[in-house]
Image: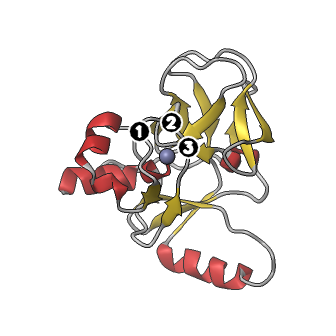
Amino acid sequence: METTSLPDPDCWLSPLARVDRSPIEGEGLFAAAPIAQGTVISRFGGRLVTDDELRRLLTRAAGTGNYVDTLSIRRDLNLVLPPNVPNHAGNHSCNPNLWWVDPYAVAARRNIEPGEELTLDYATITDDPSFEMPCSCRSAACRGQVTGRDWQLPQLQAEYGQHWVPVLREHIVGS
Ligand SMILES: [Zn+2]
């Protein structure tokens, strides 16, 4: 198993990305300038907690209106983001222009034109088998719904290669 480097305490968002209203959903991230393939756009920071600690945080936040923003990093290891960071405004697409390049960072999957919405495939983020979200991203590859089980699809494994959060890379290697 790879070792897990510690995250930065804060998130970082490239000045090449800006938050705006999205035709997909709510707010999204958009290219403020041309972005070359491979450019890191967003780096997630915060603190690492176990599943038990995360459950406690979620229980404590329930009903308070506070939203706990979290990413799965490894088995029993979750990153809790600082509150109100713009990094998580990125919407899902079944044909995303961003993908994971290390445990905490996403980069451009291809060259991106100014004004294009910046998207990730949520299937590359979550292994929660209960996660399901309808999708109408209108890409030719649209799956109609995104689930926490999509990482099992051979065509997605072929399409994304190593570009998954580490816990999903572990699942894929072990599957
Ligand atoms: Zn879609």
Answer whether residue 1 is visible to the viewer in this image: no
Q: How is the image coloured?
A: secondary structure
- Tell me which residue sits at (39%, 50%) in the image: 166
Q: How many marks?
A: 3
109 or 146, nearer to the observer: 146
Position of 11 compared to 124: left or right?
Answer: right
- Tell me which residue sits at (76%, 26%) in the image: 15
88 or 147, nearer to the observer: 147
Which label number is shown at residue 96?
2
Residue carrying label 3: 137
Question: x, y percentage for residue 19?
Answer: 78, 38
| The quadrant where residue 129 appears | bottom left
Residue carrying label 1: 141
Mark 2: which amino acid?
Answer: Pro
In the displayed structure, 56 sits above or below 112; it is: below
Position of 166 compared to 72: left or right?
Answer: left
Question: x, y percentage for residue 143?
Answer: 41, 49
In the displayed structure, 20 sits above or below 82; it is: above
Determine whether the residue tagged by mark 1 lies in a helix, strand or loop: loop
Ligand 1 under 8 Å from disc 1 Cβ:
yes
Mark 1: which amino acid?
Answer: Ala
Position of 164 compared to 29: left or right?
Answer: left
Q: Residues within 10 Å of mark 2 (few under 14, many from 20)?
A: some
Determine whether the residue tagged by mark 3 lies in a helix, strand or loop: loop
Determine whether the residue tagged by mark 2 lies in a helix, strand or loop: loop
Mark 3: which amino acid?
Answer: Cys
Circle nearer the N terminus (2, 3): 2
160 or 138, nearer to the observer: 138
Ligand 1 under 8 Å from disc 3 Cβ:
yes
Separation of marks 3 and 1 at Cα, in angstroms: 9 Å
- Which label sits in the foreground, 2 or 3? 3
Question: x, y percentage for residue 55?
Answer: 56, 80
